[in-house]
């Protein structure tokens, strides 16, 4: 039998390794965003948006990478507790003879969902640019669209789907114990399922990036912080609903002001 102290040390080392890997990816992602994510160019002492220009294949790939990195920077911190708990449970199950599974496989499944969202967001950005609905800062130029996005994001905060997904995301242990599947394939599918729940929580919030500016780092950080608070604060459900009401009011005010 393995001494308990050795098990605890092994668990601590694994947690430190997982935390280090997650931190590295998140910091790398934020670093890429801080340098402009390939979408900004130097103009004197300032970083300015690259001109719209034609959507070539290379430009489309660049936009997709920008969204993918942004989703990693924003969403991995909120998934960290789930990934860490998965690592702990996987280790304990392997000690009982089950097939060992790396937490990175679970994380890959989680991020695969957000990569699919990034592809859809890049396509939406393409459509909005073609319709002349985005400024050079990748911000909506239509008051009606801005108000509609704000109201949609606010109303979604109150929907049963949002509340169900949020409840599952706020209960990592319950999710893992009721959805556990053995092996690498099982871990990847679990990551996909958790990613789908997380997407169900946050996809409309991500559309707010078009309101504040897709490359507005303050807006990006603000939404990421809100996601963290909503998931981990004891009053997260009520904070989300209060924010929803505020967004609806903001949307109505935006549309009303334009009609005066």
Image (cartoon, rainbow, N blue to C red):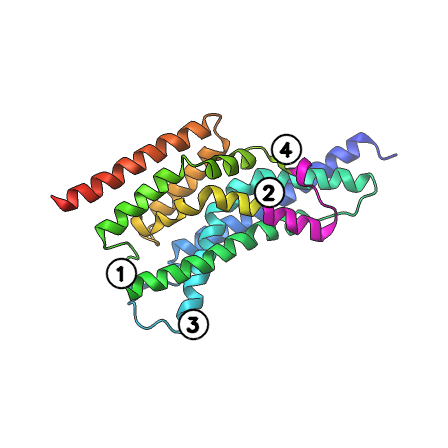
Horizontal and vertical percent position of residue 260: 11, 43
**N-term-proximal mark, 2 vs 4:** 2
Q: Is residue 178 magenta?
A: yes
Q: Residues within 10 Å of mark 4 (few under 14, many from 20)?
A: few
What stretch of residues is rendered in magenta? 176-193
Judge depth for marks 2 and 4 and give the one in front. 4
Q: CA distance from mark 3 to mark 2?
A: 34 Å
Q: Is residue 22 magenta?
A: no
Write down the quadrant of residue 13 in the picture: top right
Specify which label sits upstream in the sequence, 3 or 2.
Answer: 2
Q: Is residue 8 left or right of residue 256?
A: right
Pointers 1 and 2 in contact (CB under 8 A)?
Answer: no
Q: Where does label 3 land, which residue? A: 58
Picture residue at 45% right of the left edge, 67% below the top:
61
Q: Who comes first in sequence, dot 3 or dot 1?
A: 3
Disc 1 element: loop
Mark 1 vs mark 2: give the one in front: 1
Most distant residue in the right direction: 1
Question: From the viewer's perspective, is the residue at label 3 or at label 4 nearer?
Answer: 4
Query: Which quarter of the figure is the N terminus placed in?
Result: top right
Q: Residue at x 25, y 63 (%)?
A: 132
The residue that disc 1 covers is: 136
The residue under label 2 is 19
Q: Contact, CB < 8 Å: mark 4 with mark 1?
A: no
Question: Percent from the top left, x then y, of residue 53?
Answer: 30, 71
Marks 4 and 1 sit apart, C-alpha to C-alpha, by 45 Å
Tag of residue 174: 4
Nearer to us in this view, 129 or 42:
129
């Amino acid at each position: 039998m393995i001494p308990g102290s050795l098990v605890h040390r092994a668990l601590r080392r694994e947690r430190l390794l997982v935390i280090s890997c997650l931190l590295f990816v998140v910091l790398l992602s934020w670093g890429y965003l801080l340098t402009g994510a390939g979408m900004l160019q130097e103009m004197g002492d300032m970083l300015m948006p690259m001109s719209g220009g034609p959507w070539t294949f290379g430009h489309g790939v660049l936009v997709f990478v920008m969204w993918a990195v942004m989703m990693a920077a924003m969403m991995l911190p909120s998934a960290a507790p789930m990934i860490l708990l998965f690592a702990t449970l996987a280790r304990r199950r392997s000690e009982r003879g089950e097939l060992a599974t790396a937490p990175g496989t679970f994380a890959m499944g989680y991020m695969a969902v957000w990569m699919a969202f990034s592809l859809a967001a890049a396509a939406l950005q393409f459509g909005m640019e073609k319709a002349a609905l985005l400024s050079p800062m990748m911000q909506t130029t239509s008051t009606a669209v801005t108000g509609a996005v704000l109201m949609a994001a606010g109303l979604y905060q109150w929907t049963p789907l949002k509340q169900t997904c949020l409840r599952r995301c706020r209960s990592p242990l319950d999710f893992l114990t009721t959805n556990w599947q053995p092996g690498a394939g099982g871990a990847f599918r679990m990551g996909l399922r958790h990613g789908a729940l997380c997407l169900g929580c946050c996809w409309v919030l991500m559309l707010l990036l078009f309101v504040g500016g897709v490359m507005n780092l303050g807006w990006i950080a603000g939404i990421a912080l809100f996601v963290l608070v909503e998931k981990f604060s004891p009053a997260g459900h009520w904070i989300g609903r209060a924010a929803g009401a505020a967004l609806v009011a903001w949307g109505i005010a935006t549309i009303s002001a334009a009609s005066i």
